[in-house]
Amino acid sequence: MTQPWLQRLSWPIRAEESGIRPSGTSRRLEGLIDTIHQARTLEELQAVIISLRDLYEVEHLIYHSVNSTGQQYAALTYDPTWVEKYTADRFERIDPVVQGCYQRFNPVDWKQLDWSTKSSREFLEEARAAGVGNQGLSVPIRGPSGQFALFTVNHRCDDPAWRKFSRHSVQELLLVAHYVNQKALELERGTDVVPGQPLSPRETDALTMLALGYSRARAAERLNISEHTLRVYIEGARFKLGALNTTHAVARALVKGLLVV
């Protein structure tokens, strides 16, 4: 029986309708955010991950976090046998996804990574045999106190279909990744709230325009300021929120309830 807090995830997101847009997408994001926020245990977060996989109609969805002391937590849809082997053989030492994403900050398509070494190719063969798809997109996340996490979507399809899906879904997946990480930190620590400086009214306005889907040029026009001034407000907000980039800043502001969209 479907849990009440999962009922919001009952509609499919198809590739052709999964881009970040200010109308229907904002309602879909609101449903996703609410569902993630309602998870009260790590087991419920695992159920959310499974539902997100079904929602995006992909084969696998994975969230994996490592904190500064080396403690790990994962919510994923891979075959448990593969997870056990991956952990026992310490494949993270040679996995190009882990090694490559640790050096990056933006979403990474697996085809951008180096799979040329013998160990990488052998690892890839084992992964494919265990049901891991040939396509992947991973979002690196860096949290407080040295925490590092990966949020990954994995699927089996041809390159054109994957490019279409990635193009339409990457911005939404980036936001969802940070919401999931925020919730995981909250469940592990009891809270992830870090005291910080409040946003100024103009910084809030700037992030709100971006959250609604406006381009920087259009946002500056709506606020009756120059693009340079808008950039100053965005950078100020990003610094106060401890965000890696503008999209991360918008995500953090939304999670903290600082924006009304």
Image (tube, rainbow, N blue to C red):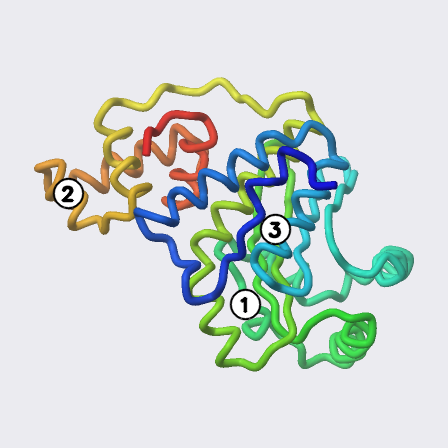
Residue at the image position 65 percent from the left and 74 percent from the top:
156
- Determine whether label 2 and label 1 are within 8 Å by CB: no
The residue nearer to you, when weighing 51 against 49, is 51
Q: How far across and down, in percent of the image, does residue 1 sit? A: 74, 41
Work out how far the residue at label 1 is from the one at label 3, CA to CA, in angstroms. Answer: 19 Å
Residue at the image position 68 percent from the left and 21 percent from the top:
190
Say which element carries label 1: strand
Say which quadrant the C terminus sits in.
top left
Relative horizontal placement of residue 196, taking residue 43 as reference (left or right): left
Say which element carries label 2: helix
| Residue under numbered circle 3 | 52
| Residue under numbered circle 1 | 109
The residue nearer to you, when weighing 79 against 249, is 79
- Point out which mark residue 220 bears: 2
Q: Circle 1: is it few (<14), some (14-19), or many (20+) Cα within 10 Å?
A: some
- Determine whether label 1 and label 3 are within 8 Å by CB: no
Q: Circle 3: is it few (<14), some (14-19), or many (20+) Cα within 10 Å?
A: many
Relative horizontal placement of residue 183, taking residue 167 as reference (left or right): right
Please tell me which of labels 2 and 1 falls first in the chain.
Answer: 1
Residue at the image position 28 percent from the left and 29 percent from the top:
204
Rendered view: 258 above or below 131? above
The furthest residue to the left? 224
